[in-house]
């Protein structure tokens, strides 16, 4: 039963997964082709390979947020019109299997994209650093400063889209609203920071707030989905 549900959810989300893979690969492919062309044309890469790969991987991970938002937004909303999700959830143990299937179809692509991005950032790009220590420091700064916030924001966007998908009338609305959620949270945290005059509050706590709210959205979406079935 679970295998059939996963296959069904894959058919619904395959275009999103394919588009997400292209969004991740496109920046890396673009900077690689640019450097390869410059190497042939001018006898050297346009940018140092470590910097180019770091930029491409970071941009690919940023674009993966779009993929997570779309996966979360389609979790329940796409099937509400024909009530296929409700029918499947009414079967024995159906609710758990439906939720597990939808979770796997969102989490696994995200882990694959992030795994590939981290391999490029932590293995491939540093291996391309030669004698220029400044380039290695640039990569280290990116890992230490950007990645935690980006990962936390990905969780927040997915959780808010998943929550919206459980009750909003359209997956497009759920996906669209999820993009504004991190902006709203950032504004609230900044307002609190200025109110209490603790000017390191955002830097220290924003990733944690993103993760907690994202997980709360995920749990809330499941609760609303189950209550809609029971109602």
Image: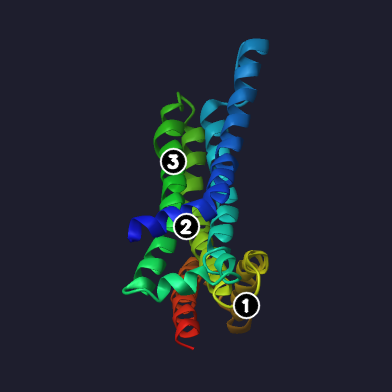
Q: Which residue is mark 3?
A: 116
User: SS of the residue at dot 3?
Assistant: helix
The answer to whether 3 is drawn above or below residue 100 in the figure is above
Secondary-structure class at tag 2: helix
User: Which residue is drawn at the image coordinates 65% and 17% (left, top)?
Assistant: 38
Closer to the camera in the image, 26 or 229: 229
Compute the Cα span from label 3 to label 1: 33 Å
Display colour scheme:
rainbow
Q: Residues within 10 Å of mark 3 (few under 14, many from 20)?
A: some
Tell me, yes or no, whether the two marked residues, 2 and 3, touch with CB atoms within 8 Å. Answer: no
Q: CA distance from mark 2 to mark 1?
A: 35 Å
Q: Earlier in the sequence, mark 2 or mark 3?
A: 2
Residue 13 appears in view: yes
**Picture quadrant of residue 31:** top right
User: Which numbered circle lies on residue 176?
Assistant: none
Farthest bottom residue?
Answer: 231
Rendering coords of residue 18 (x, y %): 55, 43
Q: Tell me what residue is drawn at x 58 percent, y 58 percent.
A: 70
Q: Which residue is mark 1?
A: 188
Q: Earlier in the sequence, mark 2 or mark 1?
A: 2
Q: Disc 2 designates what residue?
A: 9
Q: Nearer the viewer, mark 2 or mark 1?
A: 2
Q: Taking 197 as reference, is 4 left or right?
A: left
Q: Position of residue 87 (x, y in %)?
A: 46, 73
């Amino acid at each position: 039963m679970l295998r059939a549900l996963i296959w069904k959810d894959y058919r619904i989300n395959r275009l999103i997964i394919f588009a997400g893979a292209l969004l991740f690969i496109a920046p890396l492919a673009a900077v690689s082709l640019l450097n390869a062309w410059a190497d042939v044309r001018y006898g050297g890469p346009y940018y140092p390979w470590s910097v180019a790969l770091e930029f491409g991987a970071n941009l690919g991970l940023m674009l993966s947020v779009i993929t997570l938002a779309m996966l979360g937004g389609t979790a329940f909303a796409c099937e509400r019109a024909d009530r296929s999700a409700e029918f499947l959830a009414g079967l024995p143990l159906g609710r758990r299997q439906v939720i597990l299937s939808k979770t796997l179809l969102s989490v696994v692509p995200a882990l694959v994209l992030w795994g590939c991005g981290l391999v490029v950032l932590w293995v491939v790009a540093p291996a391309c650093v030669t004698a220029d220590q400044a380039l290695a420091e640039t990569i280290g700064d990116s890992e230490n400063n950007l990645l935690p916030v980006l990962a936390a924001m990905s969780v927040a966007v997915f959780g808010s889209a998943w929550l919206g998908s459980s009750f909003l009338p359209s997956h497009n609305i759920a996906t669209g609203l999820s993009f504004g959620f991190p902006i709203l949270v950032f504004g609230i945290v900044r307002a609190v920071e200025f109110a209490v005059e603790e000017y390191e509050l955002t830097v220290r706590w924003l990733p944690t707030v993103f993760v907690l709210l994202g997980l709360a959205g995920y749990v809330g979406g499941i609760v609303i989905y189950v209550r809609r079935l029971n109602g």
